[in-house]
């Protein structure tokens, strides 16, 4: 028996590292040997070193609601995930296809609405989305692209097949952890990389800056690009400052910006300086107190008018939430077929729309077997996992579904794939997903791999970091053959 | 540079200098208390705490004083100053070299641990050396630009104030026993200037020479005059050629005080000298705010939100953690 896997079982789930026989899959064989050679004590020491690096580097988040301002390190597992070149080509093609269709969809629903007029999808599902912004109908966005930065969540089922679980088209976060995880892995466990042609991830920030600069208003050759953060107390603040620093752009808060005659400026020590492109990391409703929530102090008054006037570009565009609404998600395969005349490369998880009578009837009858989600919630909140729910929780959701059917969708429980994590000196099973990031602009760029999120709580299916999730490095192989094949 | 960034960079320099200063005077005064043949009474610690920025304290013992200056939360302490420096660094992290931020951050985490009395000196030494390392990174890795000048400005204005305070207060305090070499040596050590003094001045430690060394010496990096000069130079570079801003005028005035003063004047009127210096520093605070941190250069037509409070919950408004 290997020193690490005392008592390890995959319990019937698809295990990405260890096959049903308990032996490592081909892609992981060498990695598994190396981990066992290092042994529990040494791996524990390297894990502690990694956590110290994360803490010193400032990759921490504030714990809410903690008045003491407690900070925690973003949990990290030191065993990387391996994805073969062949698998990755499939995922990359699927993601590019999906984002191309979603961008066409956004341009259409805020423009001519052909897909709705032709009833290729039910218009009432789209137009009743709480994220649909009538105020921006007809607004021309630069190059007709609405979603410049996307993060789609992929899961593997019990057969190892990939599915799209949801899309994040507004302010997807997590890419800085992709870069930080690799940074730390290279320093803490460099020996593991031997023999694996791992694709680098560092190119992301250069691509992001290139895509943002491309959005500059006409006639601006050398645009001033800024990253707009809600502030230091935002739990993704580390990511905001990391990206701003790596791109060499200003990290601004709402109070740093002012709008004068539909032009945006930042307050500097030498007076006002014009701003051409804003990579915003706050939601639509807080962006401009004149346009959205009046009480917003983190936004910039007049910003949306400057955007309308074409004097500043904003990434992502406003109103994208309609395309990552969980009810609209169910329609994405039809959206892909409508705009691209292609079958989806990456399938959706079967989804029942409670707004549709037959679907709702099925959901109410099978609530105990389904995962029910609130359409505009995120972070693993507003969700009911039927098999784990109490009678009271089920009754509560039943009542809410009947009252507000449009607000709910349901899916079968996906047996998320597992991979061992290193925990307390041995291997333990944990579920995981994958969030690759896609940039759409002068061309389409997909991060090599993305953020693998791991449900660290024993038995949990929830990978969100706000609910006990962590992450691990994701290795996409650069070539077929050799180590890393077959995952 | 963003006005908010300029504010934070200045605060970074100021708080690190303050942490260094507090760590140093604490170590020196604890040692001084042990050098006394008679155990220092409550007055000693009350005066020390006043010097450290805790006026009116009712702390009467060494252990209490150490605890207050190390970790007090209602006034300046080593821990609070490093935490404030880290907060400022977080707000301007894109303007700082990664290694510099990491040093400040790592120091913050290290000094969160409780410190036992026997570990006091290694602890204080760690704080001071870490801040030296940050200084080195600042000088060696940061572009010689506005950002660096704002950090310098904060640091050297703070140092000017600290050195002036310690020298003038000790002058007043020791007026009746001017030849107390032990106390005056402690003043030099509190300003990291004892060895420089010894190599520069002969004839032992005397009040006039200590005052000359710490306030009026143009070439000693720890002197008030030198510090004021660096602050003037920093502001001049920030302003650029041909601009004479209010902060520059005030700092030039401050520097002139140290150029023109004599040791005897400080010995005879220490409180007046300190008050004049403090008066200029207070005006400087306002001038810095008006000129760089919140400049009123926004046209009347601007829709703005300057000066409004920023509730924490609103800062969660926008894609949190993945």
Image: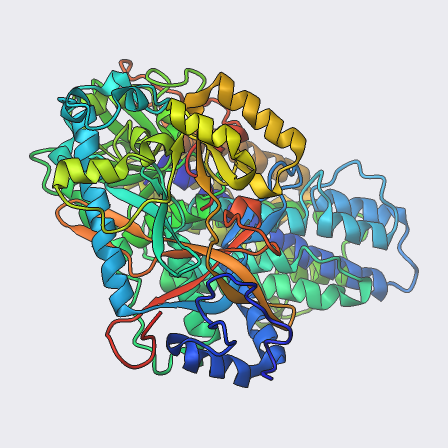
For this rendering, which residue is in front, B88 or B230?
Answer: B88
Residue situated furthest left in the rendering: A219
Residue situated furthest right in the rendering: B38
- Position of B274 with respect to A162 (left or right) is right
Q: Is residue B290 visible?
A: no
For this rendering, which residue is in front, B40 or A111?
Answer: A111
Picture coordinates of residue A195, whole percent (x, y): 34, 82
Residue A342 placement: quadrant: top left
Decide: is B56 above or below A52.
above
Picture coordinates of residue A103, whole percent (x, y): 20, 37
Q: Residue at x 82, y 49 (%)?
A: B45
- Position of B43 with respect to A374 (left or right) is right
Q: How is the image coloured?
A: rainbow
Picture coordinates of residue A134, whole percent (x, y): 26, 17
Picture coordinates of residue A114, whole percent (x, y): 13, 24
Residue A130 placement: quadrant: top left
- Position of B260 with respect to B302 (left or right) is right
Q: Residue at x 64, y 76 (%)?
A: A6
Q: Is residue A417 visible?
A: yes
Name the quarter where the N terminus of chain B is drawn: top left
Q: Residue at x 18, y 42 (%)?
A: A100
For this rendering, which residue is in front, A42 or A250?
Answer: A42
Q: Residue at x 61, y 78 (%)?
A: A40
Decide: is A234 above or below A60.
above
Decide: is A226 above or below B317.
below
């Amino acid at each position: 028996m290997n020193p690490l896997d005392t008592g390890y079982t995959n319990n019937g789930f698809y295990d990405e590292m260890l096959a049903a026989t308990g032996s490592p899959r081909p892609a992981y064989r060498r990695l598994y040997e190396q981990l066992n050679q290092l042994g529990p004590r040494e791996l524990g020491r390297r894990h502690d070193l990694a956590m110290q690096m994360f803490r010193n580097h400032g990759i921490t988040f504030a714990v809410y609601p903690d008045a003491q301002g407690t900070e925690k390190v973003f949990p990290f597992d030191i065993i990387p995930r391996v994805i073969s070149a062949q698998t990755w080509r499939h995922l990359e093609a699927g993601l590019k296809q999906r984002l191309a269709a979603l961008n066409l969809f956004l341009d259409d629903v805020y423009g001519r609405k052909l897909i709705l007029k032709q009833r290729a999808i039910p218009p009432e599902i789209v137009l009743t989305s709480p994220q649909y912004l009538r105020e921006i109908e007809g607004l021309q966005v630069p190059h007709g692209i609405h979603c410049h930065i996307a993060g789609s969540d992929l899961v593997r089922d019990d057969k190892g097949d990939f599915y799209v679980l949801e899309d994040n088209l507004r302010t997807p976060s997590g890419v800085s952890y992709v870069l930080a995880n690799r940074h730390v892995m290279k320093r803490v466990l460099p020996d593991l990389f031997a023999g694996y042609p791992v694709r680098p991830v560092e190119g992301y920030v250069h691509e992001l800056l290139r895509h943002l600069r491309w959005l500059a208003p006409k006639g601006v050759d050398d645009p001033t690009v800024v990253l707009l953060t809600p502030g230091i107390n935002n739990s993704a603040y580390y990511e905001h400052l990391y990206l701003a620093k790596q791109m060499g752009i200003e990290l601004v808060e709402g109070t740093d910006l002012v709008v004068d005659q539909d032009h945006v400026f930042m307050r500097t020590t030498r007076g006002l300086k014009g701003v051409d492109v804003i990579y915003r990391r706050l939601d639509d409703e807080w962006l401009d107190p004149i346009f959205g929530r009046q009480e917003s102090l983190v936004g910039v008054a007049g910003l949306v008018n400057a955007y309308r006037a074409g004097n500043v570009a904003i990434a992502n565009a406003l109103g994208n939430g309609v395309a990552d609404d969980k009810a609209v998600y169910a329609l994405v395969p039809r959206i892909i077929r409508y705009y691209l005349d292609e079958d989806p490369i990456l399938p959706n998880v079967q989804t029942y729309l409670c707004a549709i009578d037959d679907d709702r009837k099925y959901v109410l009858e099978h609530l105990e077997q389904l995962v029910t989600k609130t359409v505009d919630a995120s972070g693993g909140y507003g969700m009911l996992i039927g098999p784990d729910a109490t009678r009271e929780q089920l009754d509560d959701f039943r009542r809410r579904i009947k009252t507000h059917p449009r607000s709910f969708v349901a899916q079968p429980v996906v047996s998320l794939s597992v991979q061992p994590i290193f925990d307390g000196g041995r291997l333990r099973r944990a579920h995981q997903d994958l969030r690759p990031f896609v940039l759409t602009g002068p061309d389409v760029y997909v991060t090599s791999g993305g953020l693998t999120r791991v449900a660290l709580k024993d038995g949990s299916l929830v990978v969100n970091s706000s609910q006990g999730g962590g992450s691990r490095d994701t290795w996409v192989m650069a070539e077929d053959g050799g180590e890393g094949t077959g995952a | 540079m963003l006005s908010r960034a300029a504010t934070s960079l200045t605060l970074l320099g100021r708080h690190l200098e303050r942490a260094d200063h507090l760590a140093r005077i604490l170590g020196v005064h604890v040692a001084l208390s042990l050098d006394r043949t008679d155990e220092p009474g409550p007055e000693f610690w009350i005066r020390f705490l006043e010097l450290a920025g805790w006026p009116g304290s009712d702390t009467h013992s060494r252990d209490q004083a150490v605890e207050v200056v190390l970790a007090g939360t209602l006034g300046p302490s080593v821990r609070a100053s490093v935490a404030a420096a880290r907060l400022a660094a977080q707000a301007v992290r894109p303007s700082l070299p990664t290694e510099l931020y990491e040093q400040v951050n790592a120091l913050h985490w290290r000094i969160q641990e409780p410190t036992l009395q026997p570990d006091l000196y290694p602890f204080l030494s760690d704080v001071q050396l870490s801040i030296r390392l940050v200084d080195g990174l600042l000088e060696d890795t940061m572009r010689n630009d506005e950002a660096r000048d704002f950090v310098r400005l904060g640091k050297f204005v703070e140092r000017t104030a600290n050195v002036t305070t310690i020298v003038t207060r000790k002058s007043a305090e020791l007026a009746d026993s001017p030849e107390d070499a032990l106390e005056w040596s402690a003043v030099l050590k509190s300003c990291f200037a004892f060895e420089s003094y010894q190599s520069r001045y002969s004839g032992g430690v005397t009040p006039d020479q200590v005052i000359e060394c710490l306030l009026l010496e143009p070439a000693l990096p720890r002197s008030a005059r030198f510090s004021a000069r660096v602050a003037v130079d920093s502001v001049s570079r920030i302003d650029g050629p041909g601009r004479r801003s209010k902060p520059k005028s005030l700092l030039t005035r401050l520097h002139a005080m140290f150029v023109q003063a004599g040791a005897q004047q400080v010995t005879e009127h220490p409180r007046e000298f300190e008050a004049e210096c403090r008066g200029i520093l207070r005006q400087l605070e306002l001038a810095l705010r008006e000129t760089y941190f919140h400049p009123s250069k926004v046209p009347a037509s601007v829709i703005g939100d300057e000066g409004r409070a920023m509730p924490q919950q609103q800062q969660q408004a926008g894609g949190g953690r993945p």
